[in-house]
Every structure is written in C-alpha cells, then in structure tokens.
Amino acid sequence: MNRRLIKQNKTFLSIVTILFILIGSVLYFGVNQIYEREAKWRHGHAVSQLLSAKENIKVFFADLEHDLLFLRNISSTREYVDSNYESINYRSEVEKLLYEFAKVCKHYYQISIVDSSGYEIIGIDNRLDNAPVITPRTQLQNSKYKDLFRETMKMDNNQVYVSPIHSGIQKEEIAEHNFPMIGLAMPLFNSKNEKKGILALNMYLSRLLKILPENMFIQTEDGNLISLRQDGSITFNKSYYDFSDNSGWIDIPDDVTIHYSDVELLPGKELVVAIFHKHPMLKAILQRLILVSIILLALFLFLILIIGYLNLLRFRELMGAQRAIIFSLAELAEYRDPETGKHLERTRKYSVVLAKQLRNHKKYRRIITNEFIEDLYDAAPLHDIGKVGIRDSILLKEGKLTEEEFEEMKRHVLIGKKVLQDAIDKFKLRQSFIAIGRNICAYHQEKYNGKGYPAGLKDGEIPLEARIFALCDAYDAIRSKRSYKGKLPHDEAVRRIKSDRGEHFEPEVVDAFLECQNEFA
C-alpha cells in the first residue's frame, strides 16, 4: 500500500524534494556570507550587556545593604534592642515600622528580628499577592539551628551576611512557594556593644531578574541556574554549565553561545551572570530572499492544497461507501421482521431531532456537537443488527414471547455488540460513529433505573447515545403495529414515555422529548 501511494504521488514528491533542495541551497550559501560579521557584532553586544548587568547587580545589592542599615539604625530599633526586647512600646513601634516597610518593598518575602538565643522576636510575613502580616507570637520560630542565624551571629558590627540562593524559606523547612530567594542579615548590638541578635531580610530574587537584559540568567555558588521566563515565571534548576574562569564564553550545541562573567555582590559573595544567544544566520539574508521564498512557498502550498483536496474527495467517497454498506447490512436484520416497516429510517431521524433538542440543555451543550449528531444518525441503524443471530421461531413469533424465548431474544444486543467490537478490534477502526453504533447496539435496552439489560447499567453508566436512542426506539415501538398489538396514537406514546421519566428514561432526555414532541408526531 505504501509503494502504491508513493507511486501515485511520485511527481508531487519529486517537486517537493526539488523545492526543498533549492530553498536549502539558497539559504545555506546566503548564511555563510553574513555569519562571521553578524556573530562578531553579537559577541561585542553580549559583552556590553554583561558589563551593564554586573553594575546593575552591584548597585542592587548595595541598595539591599542600605535597607538593612536603615532598619537597624532607626531609633525605635536601637531602643528596642537596648531594652533587651522587653519594651512593649518599642516592640509595637518596630512592628509597625517593619510592616510599613514590607508594604512598600514587596520583594522582601520575610522580615524578622531574632534574639541572641535564636528565637524570633518579631516576624513580618510578606507573601506574594497579599498584604504583609505580622506573625503572631505563638507562630514565631526558633532559628537557632538555621545557617542564616548562626553565620550572622559570627559577624562584627556593620558586616552583612548573604545566604546562598535557595528555593523556600530555609533548607530545614518546607517552602510554600517555589520561588528563588536570598537572605540578608546583620547582627544587632546594643549601646554597650553587646551582640543581641540579628535583623534578617528574606527576598524574592525575581526583582533582580527583572532588571537584567532578556536571555540573561544567574548561576549560583551551589550550581543552580535561575532565569526569568517570558511569561514572568522563574526557572530554578540544576545548571550543567562549567564556568570555571572569571569570564569568557562557551559554545553549546544548536549554534548557541553563552557569555558569562563573575560578579561580586558583597565582600566574599559571588555569583555568575551569563547571557546566551543564537547565532544570527537569517537576519540580513531574509531581506534579499524574501521574494524568492514567498514564491517557492506559495507553489508548495498550492500543490499541497491540490493534493489535499483530491485526497479529501477520495476520503469522502470512501466514507460514503462505508456508511452505505453498513446501513445495507443493518437493513438485512430489519427485513427479517416485516412488521417494522421503515423502523431504521424513522428511529435515526427521531434520534437527530431529540439530540438537537437535548443540546439546548446546559448539561449537554458541549457534549452534543454537530459531529456527535452526524455520528448518531449514521450509527442508529446498527441498533438491532444482532437480531440476525436470533431464530426465526422467536423473532417472527406472533404474540408475546415466553420467559425463555424472551431471554434468548435479549441476546441480540450481545450478538450485535460482539459483531461490531470484533470488527473494531480486527480492522483497528477509529471512526467515532462505529463506536457509537456499538454502544447503541449494546445498551439501548438498558434503563435509567438500572432494571434494563444486558448489564443492568443505570444513570450516567449508560452511554449518552444509548440513552437518547432508547427513548426513540420505545416511541417507535409504541406507535408501530406488532403481532401482539395494534398501532397507538402519538398522545399515548407521549403519556407512556412521560410516565417512565426517571425510570426507563433519563429525566433530561424525556424533558427534551416533550419540548420537541410535535416534530416526532
């Protein structure tokens, strides 16, 4: 089959191949002419961006250090430390001060004062998208064993400790937000120059990333890579780049170069800032090749459209023939029961009318699509195909069936289901109407209350198409003449169906039927 398709489309494949070779050749030779010049310019531009970013980062962390000094040197803070954290008035003033500071400086995730024993005295929680919250005393934490506290307590006056960049509040805790953070802290001394604790600021690193140029990222001392995505979210992953020198560049696959440089945040604290870019291979050449590319692309698309249209016609013919054969096979079962008349045609039309009405109900608005209705129309005639496996003595018997005969008659749904399922499995059929036909065939005798057959399904366990068709089949059976009964009027059919609402039929399906019953009549 593949060979036949290739042979039939040999001319098309040849033209497509020639076009691709032509386009590739033109682009390849054009790119080589401008590659070196463009790459050299990009290299200089990247180095310039790195130098600018380094200065921005230094200024940024200088501002953070200034914030720490500002909060520490305010008189309320100093007096509160001198009181050995016992003054209620100064505590209130400091809490208010830190709270107002956090409202303005949203990038600080947490602000806290910790005493010399490691217990948090004041805490301000400044979560994303929420107003700052003063941490209740009962929820203040013990920071004695945290690196931020221990390292800061080793420092002298005016020294600042910068923690490693991390994801979460501390390594020992479970972070509620997976945002890169960094902690800054400095020791607190009273007027007697006694160390009384620390002042700590935990900051979201997103503020720093937003001031960096596009395509720039940071690699931490721990080897983590941090960057800002276009949608504003942040990546925080393990880095696989080796930036062993103080500055330079490395080439990675797919024609990408990374330029990098070390930057000193504060004395003794460094990280790597880097920027990557793809080599500019098309920028200038596209201006000269645009006309040729458009013409070649237009020819290519035109051929694709022609081939696609021809294949669509073939596909439609094939599907039409397939549906005609299936409907003809379904009619074979109907011809064994001469009393049913145009049962197949009527029930498929009833199904379409009912499905369209049911689609107006909010519950099924998105489920019952145009494709669903078309498939329902094509699949409905398959519902009694299993009757070909029922003996004539039972199928054509005049009068009511005995209990044993009725049990055998009920097997027609299983026979039909097996026939269709075997076809689906054997030929790997993927058309949705075949699956719908199988469901109708197998489950149109089920009842909403679970008292139907063959599986005793109820409510939503029954496929929607079977719930719809069950009402249509019952309506036609009530209206039609049988060996054991005569024809009944439309009003009687409506009365019986209405009385079976919530029992035999789904309530919503019955409601939809009552809304369109005139079309049934």
Image: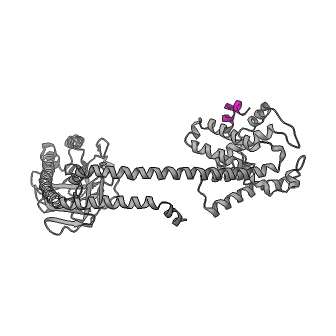
Q: Residue furthest right?
A: 398
In the image: residue 249, left or right of residue 134: left
In the image: residue 419, left or right of residue 250: right
- Can residue 201 be seen? no
- Can residue 213 be seen? yes
Q: Quadrant of residue 365?
A: top right
Where does the N terminus fall, quadrant-wise?
A: bottom right
Residue lying at 41% horizontally and 61% vertically, measured from the top left? 14
Q: Is residue 511 magenta?
A: yes
In the image: residue 381, left or right of residue 84: right
Residue lying at 68% horizontally and 57% vertically, measured from the top left? 420
Q: Measuring from the top left, give residue 377's x and y in whole percent.
A: 66, 44
Q: Which residue is nearer to you in this view: 484 or 38? A: 38
Q: Measuring from the top left, give residue 458's x and y in whole percent.
A: 69, 48
Q: Which residue is nearer to you in this view: 495 or 86? A: 495
Judged by its main secondary structure, the magenta piece is helix
Residue lying at 82% horizontally and 56% vertically, measured from the top left? 390
Q: Measuring from the top left, give residue 214's x and y in whole percent.
A: 22, 52
521 relative to 101, above or below: above
221 relative to 364, above or below: below
Q: Which residue is nearer to you in this view: 491 or 429? A: 429
Where does the C terminus fall, quadrant-wise?
A: top right
Task: Tell me the magenta residue range.
Answer: 510-521
Q: Is residue 413 magenta?
A: no
